[in-house]
Image (cartoon, rainbow, N blue to C red):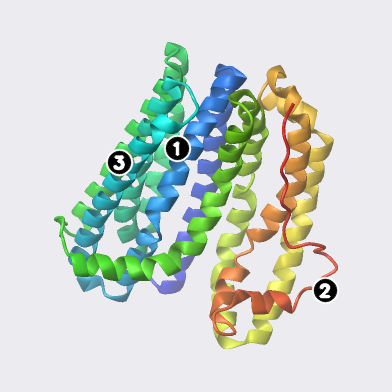
């Protein structure tokens, strides 16, 4: 397959899987929100946010580094992935131990504490899965990576329906995540073993240090962005109570699901930005300006829809019990403008311009009349 055909194939599979996965994920969240009380949904949201926070810290950019190193030298597949997999085991063990030590000090019920520990273990399984999926992405067999992603989301939705019917509650939802994440990990492991090579664990401290020292600067920015997405729930839990967290989480999860739209639209643009960043800073600046205007313009109708139709959206999507969260829905609608604009991948490609500082390209566009601000930070308390 030609490189151009491979790029098109990966872009199409990426867009398709993002849309399908996003829709199925939203359906899962809405199913849980409808099935339990607002307080129980607040518990689930806190447990999930805490576990994702732990997972993002553990990740540390290691899967991205494996992709880069394998892409540079495919002959090093076995030693790299073997060392990476063993390092992931070590990091996972340390993070689970830290969670076990931290959980007793959380000011929540025992059921929530047990769920936090169980969900943290579940997210560590996705960390292991990411180590093996890095091989598929490095070899540009992205359709298999996206297949696992979609199947995982469908499996979670199916198991959630079962848990709801059996009335197993919070612990049941944690078990769903644990089972589905372990199956995803095994799916990627089997695919890599069958297609490329059998990969034994390799304990190589020197290689561990090399991978981590290179991974942290490379993945630090992405790690911080992902951590920021979980902080709202964690801080709100600390400042208020789980009922307030549940009210906030309903519209917040809906707005998070809508991020699929700009992220999907941005995927085909990244190769363009990468080429222009290398060939012509002037052309990159022009592409950056026009793409920023485009993402800003499509964000306004979405934000207006949230502001004008907050009540019908909440009633249909979450039910009458979430109508107290209308102010949250409206404010999150305004925040969507920032989220959509920041989905523009030009900033990442721009890191290759002007000494690796994407801000240099952005600073030339400060007077853009379409985009009146760079970001929106909103905090509030639901009644």
Q: Nearer the viewer, residue 361 or 229?
A: 229
Rounded to the nearest whole Å, what is the CA distance between mark 1 and mark 2? Answer: 42 Å
Foreground tag (1 vs 2): 2
Cβ–Cβ under 8 Å for marks 3 and 1: no
Residue 270 percent coordinates (x, y): 56, 68
Q: Residue at x 47, y 45 (%)?
A: 53
Task: Answer left or right for 73 relative to 377.
Answer: left
- Label 3 and label 2: CA atoms lie apart by 50 Å
Q: Which residue is mark 1?
A: 153
Q: Secondary structure at mark 3?
A: helix
SS type, badge 1? helix
- The structure residue drawn at horizontal position 30% and vertical position 38%, both measured from the top left corner, is 182
Q: Residue at x 56, y 73 (%)?
A: 349
Neighbour class for label 3 at 10 Å: few (<14), some, many (≥20)?
Answer: few
* Badge 1 or badge 2: first in the primary sequence: 1
Name the residue nearer the viewer: 145 or 110: 110
Whether residue 288 can be seen here: yes
Q: Nearer the viewer, residue 246 or 129?
A: 246
Query: What residue is drawn where x is 67% and y is 53%?
Result: 339
**Within 10 Å of the Cα at label 1, are there few (<14), some (14-19), or many (20+) other Cα atoms?**
many
User: Of circles 3 and 2, which is in front?
Assistant: 3
Q: Which mark is residue 367?
A: 2
* Residue highlighted by disc 3: 97
Q: Quadrant of the N terminus?
A: bottom left
Instruction: Tell me residue 72's x, y (percent).
Output: 31, 75
């Amino acid at each position: 397959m030609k490189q151009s055909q491979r790029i098109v194939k990966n872009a199409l599979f990426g867009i398709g899987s993002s849309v399908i996965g996003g829709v199925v994920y939203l359906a899962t969240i809405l199913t849980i929100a409808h099935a339990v009380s607002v307080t129980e949904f607040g518990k689930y949201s806190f447990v999930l946010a805490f576990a994702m926070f732990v997972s993002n810290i553990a990740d540390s950019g290691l899967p991205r580094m494996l992709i880069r190193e394998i892409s540079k030298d495919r002959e090093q597949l076995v030693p790299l992935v073997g060392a990476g997999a063993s390092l992931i085991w070590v990091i996972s063990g340390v993070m689970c131990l830290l969670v076990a030590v931290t959980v007793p000090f959380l000011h929540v019920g025992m059921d929530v504490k047990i769920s936090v520990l169980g969900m943290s273990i579940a997210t560590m399984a996705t960390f292991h899965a990411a180590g093996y999926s890095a091989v598929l992405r490095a070899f540009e067999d992205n359709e298999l990576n996206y297949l696992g992603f979609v199947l995982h989301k469908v499996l979670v939705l199916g198991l959630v329906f079962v848990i709801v019917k059996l009335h197993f509650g919070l612990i049941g939802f944690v078990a769903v995540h644990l089972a589905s994440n372990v199956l995803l990990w095994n799916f990627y492991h089997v695919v890599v073993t069958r297609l490329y090579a059998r990969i034994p664990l390799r304990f190589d401290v020197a290689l561990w240090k090399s991978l981590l020292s290179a991974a942290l600067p490379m993945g630090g920015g992405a790690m911080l962005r992902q951590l920021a997405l979980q902080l709202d729930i964690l801080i709100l839990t600390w400042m208020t109570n789980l009922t307030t967290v549940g009210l906030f989480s309903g519209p917040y999860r809906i707005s998070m699901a809508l991020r699929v739209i700009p992220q999907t639209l941005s995927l085909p643009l990244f190769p363009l930005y990468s080429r222009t960043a290398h060939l012509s800073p002037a052309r990159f600046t022009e592409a950056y300006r026009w793409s920023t205007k485009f993402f800003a313009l499509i964000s306004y109708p979405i934000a207006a829809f949230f502001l004008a139709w907050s009540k019908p959206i909440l009633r249909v999507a979450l039910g009458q019990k979430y109508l107290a969260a209308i102010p949250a829905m409206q404010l999150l609608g305004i925040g969507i403008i920032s989220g959509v604009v920041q989905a523009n991948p030009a900033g990442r490609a721009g890191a290759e311009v002007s000494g690796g500082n994407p801000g240099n390209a952005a600073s030339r566009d400060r007077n853009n009349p379409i985009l009146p601000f760079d970001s929106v930070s909103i905090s509030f308390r639901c009644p």
